Image (cartoon, helix red, strand yellow):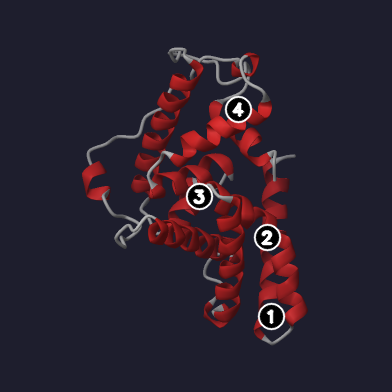
Amino acid sequence: MTAGRAQFEVSTVANDDLELVHASQNGEIAAFEELVKRYDRKLLRIAQHVTNNREDSQDVVQEAFLKAFQNLRQFRGDSKFSTWLIRITVNQSLMKLRKQRALREVSLDEGFHEERDVHPMEVTDWAPNPEQLYSVSELRDILDKALGELRLISRAVFVLRDIEGLSTDQTAEVLGLSHAAVKARLWRARLQLRESLTRYFGKQPKSVGGGLFPGRDTAEELRLHWTARS
């Protein structure tokens, strides 16, 4: 698929979403139900990666759709509806985790002042072929555990950028972060994940090339594994 074709399809979906949103705002429940069908699996996947819990993620998605419906008239179309919906879902996920862990309420950009001097850089991949040691299900468990060790906002950044494939700008919009903050947190998340997985696989990371499987980059491999179950 060419870049132009992909952009056209994205634009078409966005326009279609807007039509459904307008219909929903005018009281057509069926239109909102169509939006739910369109995004429930994606939101469930995002919520599950952020909360690291299936039941919690189901609660989060229900709460997110309810909140979206209740505040639908506040959506003015300044951003894509999907972006607005993802932001609500991530916020609900983080709120649930903070309540569960008795964390004090913080803003999405908390701690960024500590990262102003951090320059994002490419993180090299670790040694290939862990499936020689682990089954697919065991590998997913390891990946989930490693993801769960990340700080909440860093985890959200990684989920949106490297698992869901959102752009840096889209991720920044969803999380209310600056472009630089997203890049810094993504760099830290990738580095921590690499270190965590290196411990599991018992091999040192290579300086060049070679991801979990030969011929694929790390982000693409992680996306394949984390999205395969949904």
Q: In terms of sequence position, does the residue under pointer 1 or pointer 4 come before the other?
A: 1
Q: CA distance from mark 1 to mark 4?
A: 42 Å
State the SS at label 3.
helix
Between tags 2 and 4, which lies in front?
4
| Percent coordinates x, y for residue 3 in the rendering | 67, 42
Q: Nearer the viewer, residue 137 or 18?
A: 137
Three-letter code for the amino acid on which mark 4 is drawn: Leu
Q: Residues within 10 Å of mark 4 (few under 14, many from 20)?
A: some
Q: Extreme bottom residue here? A: 26
Mark 3 neighbour class, 10 Å CA radius: few under 14, some 14 to 19, many 20 or more: many
Amino acid type, callout 3: Val
Q: Earlier in the sequence, mark 3 or mark 4?
A: 3
Query: Which of marks 3 and 2 precedes in the sequence?
Result: 2
Local packing at callout 2 (Cα closer than 10 Å; few below 14, some 14-19, many 20+) is some
Residue bearing the label numbered 1 = 24
- Frontmost residue, 17 versus 111: 111
Quadrant showing the N terminus? top right
